[in-house]
Image (tube, rainbow, N blue to C red):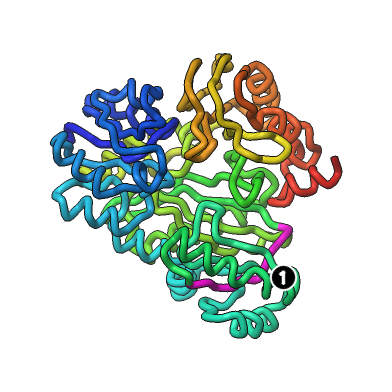
Amino acid sequence: MQKVLIANRGEIAVRIIRTCKEKNIKTVAVYSEADEGMPFTQLADEAVLLGPPPIAQSYLNGDAMIKIALDQQVDAIHPGYGLLSENATFAQKVQDAGLIWIGPEPDVIQKMGDKVIARQTMLEAGVPIVPGVNEVKDLEQAKLAAEQIGYPVMLKASAGGGGLGMQVCQNEAELQASFPTLQKKAASYFGDDCLFLEKWLSQTKHIEVQIVADQLRVTHLFERDCSVQRRNQKVIEESLAPSIRPQTREYLYEMAVRAAEAVQYTGVGTVEFLVDEQEQIYFLEMNTRLQVEHTITESITGLDLVALQIHLIEGNHLPDSIWTIRPQGHAFQFRIYAEDPETFYPSPGTIQTYRIPQDEGIRMDSGVELGSIVSPYYDPLIAKCIVHADSRVLALTKSKRALTEFEINGIKTNIPLLLRILEEQTFVQGNYRTNLLEKSKTKG
């Protein structure tokens, strides 16, 4: 592989470019008019204008990306995360154009992207799933299903993901109000208005297992706790997960590998689970791509997962050393969002001060720099602060120092919220659940 187009933007584009440089692979960045001059466009060997700022005309314009890839004579396309990374149609078009898709096969993306099919696949494979009904075609069917399952229920879009396309319904009135709205959103956002129902499990941990696979074998690279969330989107991740029993951890690994084997997965991916108070586990979804939080797995294993993606897509087997890796120390990832820490509303603007923490064990994956304009058009994630230390206690102390030293002016960020979470007793003890932020806000 000599040349790669990165079908993404921001910090993940920067991160992919860095690995490509280390492997002497040339890179092509694509950018919208709103992202002209951003760091990822400067780091790439070539940068090509993709289109106007609106996301549908730029970063979701797969046909334009493929044309640029062919014009620039690249060998492969790396989708990063989000955007088109789990779009099976785009992945197939990339392959049909004679290009390498750095990800799993399109049919696997399709199967796992449809949450109803994914649930059924896992059920048949013997992987525990949340009790629910796989498809509800209308409101009356949804009401009957909810009565069978018992309130509260989670109404979900079959094609949803990334925290979008879901709504908790505490009773029939809420279900009646939510059903038509979510159906319209699902059709608009995902091009599919199919909905399904699951039992709503409130007191849960959200734990995911990193899996890697070649054509013959699948293994895991331990787990990440992603339970600190706002609006169903992750804010802080850590590895290993605190406060779960060793036998639960091993069972998570076993089920994640089984899930990957069930769909003949190849490459780098993630299997997500909910873990309840009794430590029963339930399959949530499979992410057929690199995760935002892959960084903490890299911190505790010493691996470069982007390099491993490239290694595997070139037809190589998993390295022998991967079977004997043991986790080293503890790592946190803090997502730095350009948003109001109280309302979570986006905070676009020009970055007037940008001083990042610098110390051993602190890694910054940043998509911005001094003078960068944070656009209102895209996801407000601007950087990730990754902290690694020999123990969780030491990593917590280092995290507080890193976030305190992180100085950004010109826009609002969620750093005050992150620092507040680090003082929460349940977080410090490691026995928090996905409702941590909700409880913290109520208490505050």
| Rendering quarter of residue 1 | top left
Rendered residue at 64%/58% (across/down): 275
Q: Is residue 332 at all visible to an observer of this figure?
A: no
Residue beneath disc 1: 174
Q: Position of residue 122 (x, y in %)?
A: 47, 69
| Rendering quarter of residue 316 | top left
Q: Position of residue 278 (x, y in %)?
A: 72, 62
- 376 and 127: which is toward the camera: 376
Q: Position of residue 230 (x, y in %)?
A: 65, 46
Rendered residue at 21%/43% (across/down): 314
| Rendering quarter of residue 252 | bottom right
Q: Is residue 167 at all visible to an observer of this figure?
A: yes
**Which amino acid, mark 1?**
Glu
Q: Which residues are magenta?
A: 194-203
Rendered residue at 38%/53% (across/down): 86
Determine whether, in the image, residue 417 is placed left or right of residue 13: right
> Is 52 above or below relative to 247?
above
